[in-house]
Image (cartoon, rainbow, N blue to C red):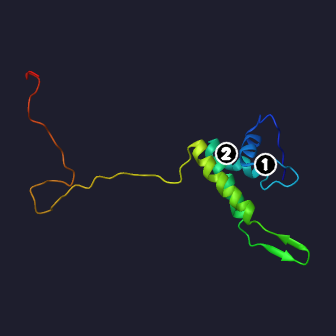
Amino acid sequence: MTITFTPDLSDDVSYIRFHIGDTNVDGAYLQDETIQAIYDEAQDYGVAIVSCIRYIITQLSSPNFSKDWLSVSNGEARQGYETMLKEKKIEFGVSSLTAVATIALPYREDSDQDSSVSTYTDDKDTADEDF
């Protein structure tokens, strides 16, 4: 597994790494192969960046650890990434929700209506009217 970052952002991995703030090759959260796989599936920088940030948040969601003189707290880092996630969703226009509108028409099976889809036709001929 490799971890690379080129400051000129000339490759997909470095570009995504820059936006998620994972540029320290000595302590990166994600491997290059993971970032590339996420980008290959998304085929969109914004979606890949949001997915990588979500992954980092899951890694930082492990419980705090304390033993003798060693103490590890992930809460502040996780909170920073959650804020970044909101900002990047706005920056790249990535939405978590998909809205679908459906119009429900009243329909009674005992009526003369032949289907639940209602159609409207205007029988007036307005071509010859003076306005």
Q: What is the quadrant of residue 14 in the picture?
A: top right
Nearer to the camera, 110 or 84: 84
* Residue that appears at 18% across and 45% down: 119
Q: Does residue 5 appear anywhere in the picture?
A: yes
* Element on which disc 2 rests: helix
* Comes first in the chain, label 2 or label 1: 1
Apparent side of residue 114 relative to residue 65 in the rendered image (left or right) = left
* Element on which disc 1 rests: helix
What residue sits right under mark 1 in the picture?
32
* Residue that appears at 69% across and 60% down: 79
Residue sticking out furthest to the right = 69
Q: Give residue 44's position: percent from left, percent from top.
A: 62, 42
How far apart are the alpha carbons under marks 2 and 1?
Answer: 12 Å
Residue sticking out furthest to the bottom = 68
Q: Where, quadrant-wise, is the C terminus in this rendering?
A: top left
In the image, what residue type sits under mark 2? Asp
* Residue that appears at 14% across and 39% down: 121
Q: Give residue 104's position: percent from left, percent from top.
A: 26, 56
In the image, what residue type sits under mark 1? Asp
Q: What is the quadrant of residue 70 in the picture?
A: bottom right
Is 121 above or below relative to 73? above
Nearer to the camera, 70 or 39: 70
Q: Does residue 43 appear anywhere in the picture?
A: no
Q: Give residue 55's position: percent from left, percent from top.
A: 69, 58
What residue sits right under mark 2 in the picture?
40
**What's the mark number on residue 10?**
none
Q: Residues within 10 Å of mark 1 (few under 14, many from 20)?
A: some
Q: Are marks 2 and 1 in contact (CB under 8 Å)?
A: no
Q: Give residue 108's position: percent from left, percent from top.
A: 15, 61
